[in-house]
Image (cartoon, rainbow, N blue to C red):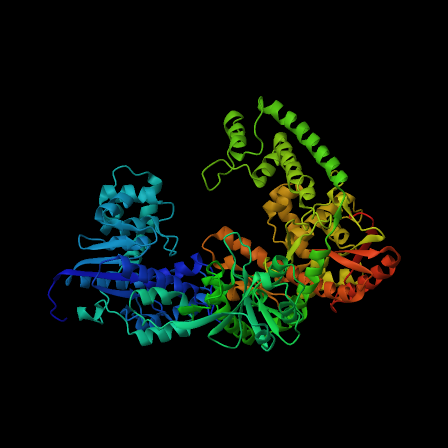
Amino acid sequence: MHNVSLSPESVFYLIDASGFLFRSFFALPSLTTSQDRPIGALLGLCNMVLKLWEEQNFTHWALVLDSKEPTFRHDLMPSYKSHRKRPPEALLEQFSFLPELCESFSIPYIVQSGFEADDLMVSYGKWGANFAQKVCLVSCDKDLMQAVTSKIVMYDPVKNIWIHEEEVKKRWGVSPKQIPDIQALSGDSCDHIPGIPGIGLKTATLWVQEAHSLEAVLQGKIKTLSSHKRKLIQEFQDQARLCYRMACLRDDAPILHSDFSYFRRRIPNSDSLERFIDHMELRQLKRRLTGLGWLKIKDPITVFVKLWQPPDLCSQSLTYISWPKDNTGKILGALLATHSENLLTFVPFSDFKTKEWQTFWQSASNLKIFWDTLFILRKLNQEIPPLLEDLKILEYLIRGCHSSDTALKTIAQSGLEVFAIDIKWDTRILEEQQSMCEIQEAFFGIQAYKMFKERIKNLEIHTLYTTLDLPLIQCLRKMELHGISINISVLSELSQKLFNKMDELEKKIYKIFNKPVNLASPKKLAEVLFQDLGWPVSKKGKSGQYSTDSSVLEEYALQGYSVAQDILDWRHCAKLKQSYTDTLPNQLNPDTGKIHSSFSMSTTSTGRLASFHPNLQHIPVSSEFPIRSAFLSSPGYVFLSLDYSQIELRLLAHMGNIPSLIEAFQKEQDIHRATAQTLFDTHEVTSEHRKYAKTVNFGILYGMSAFGLARQLNISSQEAQNYIQRYFDLYPGVKDYMKQIEEQVKKEGSVYTLWGRKCTVLDIHNASSIARQGAIRQAINAPLQGTCADFMKKAMLACENLLGNKGHLLLQLHDELLLEVKEEYAESISQQIKSLMEKIEQLKVPLKVHSSCGKTWK
């Protein structure tokens, strides 16, 4: 060992890099490079390390890494950590970059074969205490508390908590050195250390407090001990001693870097750091690193913004257009970027009606690139240009049905290097028309577009983009402009009917409550239910208040609390009234007298379309309150509705290659009836049987648990589990398909539709088991729902070509198309569209489409 004297100013930080990388992976959203390399956990670790550099006063430091090889604990106990699943590939790949990250940041790192990071932190911490005034173990791992001494402390940066000896005693009830004694008795489920069966943490703590050590406990030094526990100690004493060795962190690992100056805090070499940042596309860190002085400050690029001159625009083959706005969101003009890297062109809003602008806009020789074309067309009330590309849709496809809020955010995350811009404005451009954000978007937009086009060039999503999503912009814009008529009188009658129903329910509810209550207030409702009426508490919300959400009230209704169903019915009526009958009349366009919904292709996680302002996709089919009947076809036209029959079940049969399902659909069997025959072991299937079977068919498709199915069918969990088991016995391939999808999404983080659309499942590695289970259910359904969405988009484009001036597309509702067609063509168009929808793709099972027409939408 080198003779390095103790420095009163030296502070040595040992950072649990493996632990923080693991934590970042499960806590933060997934992030990948332009080459689909995962980097989200590395970015999280970098941010944490930089935060330590900026906020903590230390002189020496090191990142400590786990070794890939088995450790001495695996030799002692082969079952050690055996219950843990192999980490996801995306996490393992990021672990492999830790040494390169440390070298690029000039941070010393410690990794030694046969030792875990915890052992190395304790060993190097004990050694470092000879040279440093203080040693700090930076970690969230409770096991490290046993290493805390007067000179060695712990720091949890996630909770921002310092842990000294007194804090350890407060938490554990014993000194740091006695923690392994407790763990040897109670075990540690996280690491699969068994301890003594039947001995919990509380009992173990009391014993160690009394006897002071494991060995004393095993030697019978506990005064009051039941014969049963005495027998357990006697029987499992050898196992307890082994668990003690497992729980003790080693402090004798070889010190491979014995020169303490090796760990001195240093500023990294800016060139090697920048190469690593660029290679890993961690460019979000650049501004922070430049601020620390770790990267060289580059000279800003000078960009000239000139006022437009019409002849210049039409001569360009490629133009990215951003739209400066004022504080209210009103568009002030257009900023145009072309191949001329350092030159942007500004067009004032007042010039949009000029002949020159319209000539440019309608030019088929100039490719125009937008971020969210439909949004821009709505704002400008312009016709769609003949040649365009949409950066938002490109990003949505590449990121697996997820999109950023803004173009600038997309560009920053795209892998492009975004650097400072020095802007030189044309003196004729008014100050209020100058917008920095849109300058950056326009300047980098063309580069991002080219990068995205290159990324999808050889992928299946290139075909989806060029043949489905991009052409659909024009189709959706026509739907938005055409709109749909409503009968205000019908809505007014329904609103009154809903009001009467709510009034009736209120009187019924108030009678049970013995007083009027604001039923729209969850807090007031909870006070009555759980305090006044004394209902047993089911669960609490995030704020700590008693929960009265739908799932809670449904559970109480099943238990016989009739007022719970009354409250649910009241809420349903209130939602219909507030969302539709009272709101839709106010959303009529005064110029057209119609409702004009807006549509989005980049909102859902499966490629489905979304409708908003107003949302017409979620209007329920109801016999009691038929809101759809208020929608009217235009004079001389009728509504034509075409919807796929059981399409997701048919897709399940095809994509899962499930022989029994394929055979049932090929024979055109009633699939719900066939399922009911097996579930109830009868050929005499009643309507109730079929209803149950339908719930099971679609419930399993959406990953419904036995508990969820039991609640929906009002049966016991055991009955529901029996139904699910019989279903899997009838269609064994379904379980295999679900298992296959689960394995795929855990490995890749994404699933795919039949035509190759990527659906990224964000929570598949979430730290919360509830979130992970939800992600698995989402993954199982996403390929089916997404494939249906792809089919519907292709059908919509085919309808556009077929209709001509005979009708219009109005809405797309998941597996249904709603059209308005001239009465004389209704029957022939219905047959043609039905045929093209059924032939949209050649599957192992036939696709079936139901059609209906009428003057109102029902």
Q: Where is residue 192? Give x, y as percent.
A: 39, 56
Q: Quadrant of the N terminus?
A: bottom left
> Does residue 220 show up?
no
Which residue is located at x 73 percent, y 65 percent? 797
The answer to which of 382 and 176 lies nearer the viewer is: 382
Q: Where is residue 518? Give x, y as percent.
A: 57, 30
Q: Name the outermost residue toward the front.
A: 428
How many numbered circles are shown?
A: 0
Is 827 on the left-hand or right-hand side of 485?
right
Q: Is residue 515 above or below residue 570?
A: above
> Does residue 243 show up?
yes
Is 708 on the left-hand or right-hand side of 21?
right
Q: Name the outermost residue toward the right.
A: 824
Is 180 on the left-hand or right-hand side of 601?
left
Which residue is located at x 32 percent, y 76 percent? 271
Q: Where is residue 251? Give x, y as percent.
A: 23, 61
Q: Where is residue 145? Give x, y as percent.
A: 27, 52
In which image quadrant can residue 745 be found? bottom right
In which image quadrant can residue 69 be found? bottom left
Is 303 on the left-hand or right-hand side of 858?
left
